[in-house]
């Protein structure tokens, strides 16, 4: 295999010596590209694409260079440099010099390979284009990417439609079906839809196979006739779909080595009518295996594991296969070399088992794999021994046939069995007719397309099978291109149809068989064209007159000529009067004998049917008889034909007037001009003239129709214009009349308008005033609604305060009950103390009653004065404590709100600063409160000491004859009272500070509550532990204790009443404050104030009890 390096050359030869396919793999040449320079580097080819003829193909490399390779002319050219890698190519546009290139930047460009110019630039994809499919007309193209498929008009290079799918589904491939206007779209979920390319309406959907494993379709291929779809994917199974019936035909299982199918390609064949039977399967191992989809047998494979294949392109003509190898090069394979093994003819039907014995000159012939006819008996048939006649070397040479067959031996076999085996009949016919199999000449005829004489063949000869119709149409067209007479022959389709049906899968053999029949068995048929061959009919009639004069006389008497009873059999080649098996048996004998055998077969058919023919007298009966099947044994007809061939005189025998068999020439078909050319040419010219006249007539008729349509349109336009003018005139008159009437009315309206303006002005003023009033009323209503809303809000808050006050009153009642219990306990303790003191000082009560009364009166007066001063101080402290509690509660509430809104990062710092400020203010106020309490306490004790000093001075002034222990007792009592009053604040402050440390830094509740409780406890302890000195009189002590208890109870009741008045006054003040303040902070501070007031009242009650 040759290797060609295109290098940096822009043109050159593909190979430099006559290429020969490799006998091992059928490769012709390998093409690579390396960069020049010191360090040469191989550049990979990426994609390839053939043109419609299959003679040229495009190849794009990794550097963006596009080459065109002409395999027929052995040339290559660099036609474009895109500077970026291509992702897809298409070379089958309507303008054959243009091609499409999909590039790595997701764009598609159209270039001209001759001028190397950019024709158009198409954009619209968002990812790489994976495939480009062009319609068979070359006008439209479909480009497919992973997410979308777009339909382009190649005349305007504009996008017509766009197919979008969900990203989860994805598109595998979208392409046109050959020879149709159908678009096939294949998706990742194995769903396949068919669309009409004109309307883009969904025609059908192929059902997704439910049974068996899922294939995950990745590769698709369609036959040239567009009827069969092959699909494969991540499996070694292939699905073959019938697009006509939309059903799954079969599932083909590839060898176990195949795990994934990467590409599928049908191998075209010019003789299969587009229904390709060979399918190429490129698997993951880089080997492409070609199989027969009917027999499911492996035909051949290309590629190896060492040099794997990445992609494949098959020429539309089926002559070459081009592959992109894993190494980056291109390989061109010859299909003929790859298929020569299975295209060999079958082995010889008859073989010489034993040679010629020189002694007895006997030859043994034994059939090899021949199958006996079905009508033979089951007995074993011994090989027949035939006497060999002395034949001249010239006769032996004439009887020798291709593939080792001998004509005389075949004739002997035919006379023995009456027909050839059906299995080998086609092979025997090809040998008997010595078909040359001129592929190139036949392809040149087929490539010319359908002849104009047979464009309407379906109308004249309707055939159900489209395959047979296309085959017959192509055969007749090829015959017409071979010789013009066949385009004018009306009976040619009837003659050729049996061969088309017999050789429908091999058009070449069918053409050459029909051509051989026309050349040899149709001699002198066209000399009287367009009339029937009178000379040939005369031959048959002379033979019939010699063998059956009575029958011929009957036909003459009935007015039946040879054109009625001979020509129908000849122009249809007996296909109308015989069945398939009978026709094949007859032509086994026709092809094995002289061309005159066919004419003698006509005489034999007529004579074998003499009985029914003698009964016919009407012309219609004869016409029906020779155009329909009759009950006749074809074997008897053949035997009669052989008898007539042997018994007919030489002067009447058609053999004397017909030439011997001449096969078709090899290479090129012989010239067929045995017909009156002037008639054919005249008819062709007449037909062309008639066609031109028809076209001229159609054109003139179209022009007349256009002129009539234009005339009608103009008449309608003129009539519409005149009508419009009349309407305009009428409208103008009406407008003038209306204008005069309007002018007369206008004066009246102006007067009314002035009055109306005055009225409207008054109404406008009235409406403005009403609107102003309505607006004021609306504002008043809004204010009233706002006031009502505020009243409701105040009422709601007052209700909340009443509820809180009720709760506070309940707490006060509970506290009062506790105080009553404590008072009972105190009274019990005082009673006990009174009894003890009474027992101790009973003896001295009477002596010192007056002195004790005076001292007690003075002492209680001082205590009352001190108690009044202390009450005022406590009220001041309670208000300070209530305010501190209110601020502390506000601080706690704000801290709670700020903590809930802590996620707002921008406000967090401001909230912390606010809390710190409030905390500092609370601490400062607490410190001020404590300092105020200390100052009040100091002032109170200073007053007490001052009063005591004045009392002592008064006593000294009154007289110093009292007992010496009274001052000392008074001093000790005052010291105990002072110590009981001084110690609790310090303890309570320490406890408050401890509690302040344990609680929140912003809370001062513990600091303000604990001192009262500790103070009450200290007072209770002092009261319980109080005992008079030993020198005190029991009577005086008992009396003073009883007076102190009664006075304390009375004072407690008075303080309770004052407390209730204070609570009511506090509620009134809070209600007034809530009416004046509208902020949420002041509203929220009501509850802490009430609580602090309640606590202050409790402290007051406790101090009063003490």
Image (tube, rainbow, N blue to C red):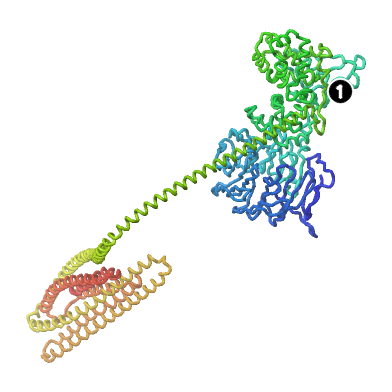
- Label 1, on which residue? 398
Q: Is residue 828 visible?
A: yes
Q: Position of residue 720 (x, y in %)?
A: 46, 46
Query: Image check: 136 left or right of 536?
Result: left
Q: Is residue 238 visible?
A: no
In the rendered image, the vertical position of residue 448 relative to residue 1097, given as above or below: above
Camera-nearest residue between 690 and 769: 690
Q: How many marks?
A: 1
Q: Secondary structure at mark 1?
A: helix
Query: Image check: 408 left or right of 202?
Result: right
Neighbour class for label 1 at 10 Å: few (<14), some, many (≥20)?
few
Picture quadrant of residue 746: bottom left
Q: Position of residue 96 (x, y in %)?
A: 70, 46
Picture quadrant of residue 492: top right
Query: Image check: 355 left or right of 148?
Result: right
Camera-nearest residue between 147 and 121: 121
What residue is drawn where x is 68% and y is 48%? 89
In the rendered image, the vertical position of residue 604 relative to residue 859, given as above or below: above
């Amino acid at each position: 295999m040759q290797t060609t390096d295109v290098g940096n050359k822009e043109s050159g030869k593909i190979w430099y010596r006559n290429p020969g396919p490799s006998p091992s793999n059928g490769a012709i040449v390998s093409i690579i590209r390396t960069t020049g320079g010191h360090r040469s580097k191989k550049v990979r080819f990426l994609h390839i694409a053939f043109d419609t003829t299959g003679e040229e193909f495009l190849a794009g490399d990794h550097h963006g260079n596009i080459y065109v390779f002409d395999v027929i002319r052995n040339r290559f050219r660099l036609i474009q440099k895109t500077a970026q890698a291509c992702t897809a190519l298409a070379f089958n546009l309507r303008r054959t010099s243009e091609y499409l290139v999909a590039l790595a930047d997701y764009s598609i460009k159209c270039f001209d390979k001759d001028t190397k110019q950019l024709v158009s630039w198409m954009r619209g994809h968002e990812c790489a284009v994976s495939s480009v499919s062009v319609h068979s007309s070359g006008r439209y193209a479909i480009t497919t990417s992973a997410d979308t498929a777009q339909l382009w008009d190649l005349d305007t290079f504009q996008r017509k439609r766009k197919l979008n799918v969900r990203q989860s589904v994805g598109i595998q491939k979208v392409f046109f079906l050959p020879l149709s206007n159908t678009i096939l779209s294949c998706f990742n979920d194995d769903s396949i839809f068919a669309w009409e390319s004109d309307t883009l309406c969904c025609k059908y959907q192929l059902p997704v196979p439910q049974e068996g494993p899922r294939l995950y379709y990745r590769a698709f291929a369609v036959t040239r006739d567009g009827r069969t779809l092959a699909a494969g994917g991540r499996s070694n199974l292939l699905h073959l779909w019938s697009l006509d019936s939309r059903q799954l035909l079969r599932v083909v299982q590839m060898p176990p080595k195949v795990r994934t199918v990467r590409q599928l390609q049908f191998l075209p064949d010019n003789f299969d009518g587009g229904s390709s039977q060979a399918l190429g399967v490129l698997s993951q191992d880089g080997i492409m295996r070609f199989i027969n989809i009917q027999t499911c047998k492996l035909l051949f494979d290309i590629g190896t594991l060492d040099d794997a294949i990445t992609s494949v392109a098959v020429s539309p003509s089926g002559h070459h296969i081009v592959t992109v190898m894993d190494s980056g090069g291109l390989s061109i394979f010859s299909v003929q070399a790859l298929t020569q093994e299975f295209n060999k003819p079958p082995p010889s039907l008859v073989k010489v088992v034993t040679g010629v014995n020189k002694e007895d000159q006997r030859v043994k012939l034994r059939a090899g794999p021949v199958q006996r006819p079905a009508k033979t008996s089951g007995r074993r048939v011994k090989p027949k021994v035939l006497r060999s006649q002395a034949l001249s070397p010239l006769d032996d040479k004439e009887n020798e046939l291709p593939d080792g067959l001998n004509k005389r031996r075949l004739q002997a076999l035919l006379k023995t069995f009456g027909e050839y085996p059906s299995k080998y009949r086609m092979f025997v016919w090809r040998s008997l007719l010595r078909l040359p199999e001129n592929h190139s000449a036949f392809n040149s005829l087929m490539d010319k397309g359908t002849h104009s004489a047979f464009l309407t063949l379906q109308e004249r000869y309707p055939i159900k099978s489209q395959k047979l119709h296309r085959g017959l149409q192509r055969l007749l067209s090829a015959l017409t291109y071979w010789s013009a007479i066949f385009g004018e022959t009306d009976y040619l389709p009837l003659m050729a149809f049996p061969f088309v049906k017999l050789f429908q899968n091999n058009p070449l053999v069918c053409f050459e068989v029909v051509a051989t029949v026309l050349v040899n068995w149709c001699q002198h048929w066209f000399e009287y064209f367009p009339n029937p061959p009178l000379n040939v009919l005369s031959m048959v009639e002379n033979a019939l007159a010699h063998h059956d004069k009575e029958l011929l006389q009957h036909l003459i008497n009935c007015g039946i000529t040879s054109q009625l009873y001979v020509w129908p059999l000849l122009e249809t080649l007996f296909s109308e009067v015989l069945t398939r098996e009978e026709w094949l048996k007859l032509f086994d004998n026709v092809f094995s004998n002289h061309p005159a055998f066919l004419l003698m077969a006509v005489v034999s058919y007529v004579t074998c049917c003499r009985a029914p023919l003698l009964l016919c007298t009407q012309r219609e009966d004869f016409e029906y008889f020779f155009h329909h099947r009759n009950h006749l044994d074809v074997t008897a007809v053949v035997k009669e034909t052989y008898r007539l061939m042997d018994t007919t005189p030489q002067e009447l025998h058609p053999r004397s007037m017909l030439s011997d068999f001449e096969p078709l020439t090899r290479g090129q078909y012989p010239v067929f001009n045995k017909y009156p050319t002037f008639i054919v040419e005249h008819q062709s010219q007449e037909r062309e003239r008639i066609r031109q006249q028809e076209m001229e007539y159609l054109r003139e008729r179209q022009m007349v129709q256009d002129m009539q349509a234009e005339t009608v349109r103009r008449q309608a336009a003129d009539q519409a214009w005149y009508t419009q003018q009349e309407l305009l005139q009428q409208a103008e008159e009406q407008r003038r009349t209306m204008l005069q009437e309007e002018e007369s009315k206008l004066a009246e309206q102006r007067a009314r308008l002035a009055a109306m303006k005055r009225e409207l002005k008054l109404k406008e003023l009235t409406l403005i005033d009403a609107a102003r009033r309505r607006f004021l009323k609306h504002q008043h209503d809004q204010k009233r609604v706002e006031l009502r809303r505020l009243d409701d809000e105040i009422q709601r808050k007052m209700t909340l305060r009443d509820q809180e006050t009720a709760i506070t009153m309940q707490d006060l009642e509970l506290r009062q009950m506790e105080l009553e219990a404590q008072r009972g306990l105190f009274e019990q303790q005082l009673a006990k103390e009174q009894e003890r003191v009474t027992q101790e000082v009973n003896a001295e009560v009477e002596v010192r009653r007056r002195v004790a009364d005076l001292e007690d009166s003075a002492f209680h007066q001082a205590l009352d004065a001190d108690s009044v001063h202390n009450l005022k101080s406590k009220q001041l402290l309670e208000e300070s404590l209530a305010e501190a509690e209110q601020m502390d509660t506000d601080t706690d509430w704000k801290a709670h709100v700020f903590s809930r809104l802590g996620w707002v990062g921008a406000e967090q710092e401001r909230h912390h600063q606010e809390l710190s400020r409030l905390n500092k203010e609370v601490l400062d106020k607490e410190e001020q409160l404590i300092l105020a309490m200390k100052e009040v306490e100091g002032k109170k004790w200073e007053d007490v000491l001052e009063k005591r000093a004045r009392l002592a001075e008064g006593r000294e002034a009154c007289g110093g004859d009292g007992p010496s222990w009274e001052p000392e007792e008074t001093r000790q009592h005052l010291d105990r009272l002072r110590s009981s009053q001084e110690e609790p604040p310090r303890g309570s402050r320490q406890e408050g500070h401890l509690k302040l440390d344990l609680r929140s830094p912003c809370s001062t509740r513990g600091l303000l509550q604990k001192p009262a409780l500790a103070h009450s406890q200290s007072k209770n302890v002092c009261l319980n532990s109080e005992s008079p000195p030993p020198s005190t009189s029991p009577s005086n002590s008992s009396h003073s204790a009883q007076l102190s208890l009664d006075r304390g109870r009375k004072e407690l009741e008075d303080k309770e009443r004052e407390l209730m008045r204070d609570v009511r006054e506090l509620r009134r003040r809070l209600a007034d404050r809530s009416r004046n303040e509208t902020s949420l902070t002041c509203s929220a501070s009501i509850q802490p104030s009430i609580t602090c007031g309640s606590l202050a009242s409790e402290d007051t009650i406790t101090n009063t009890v003490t």
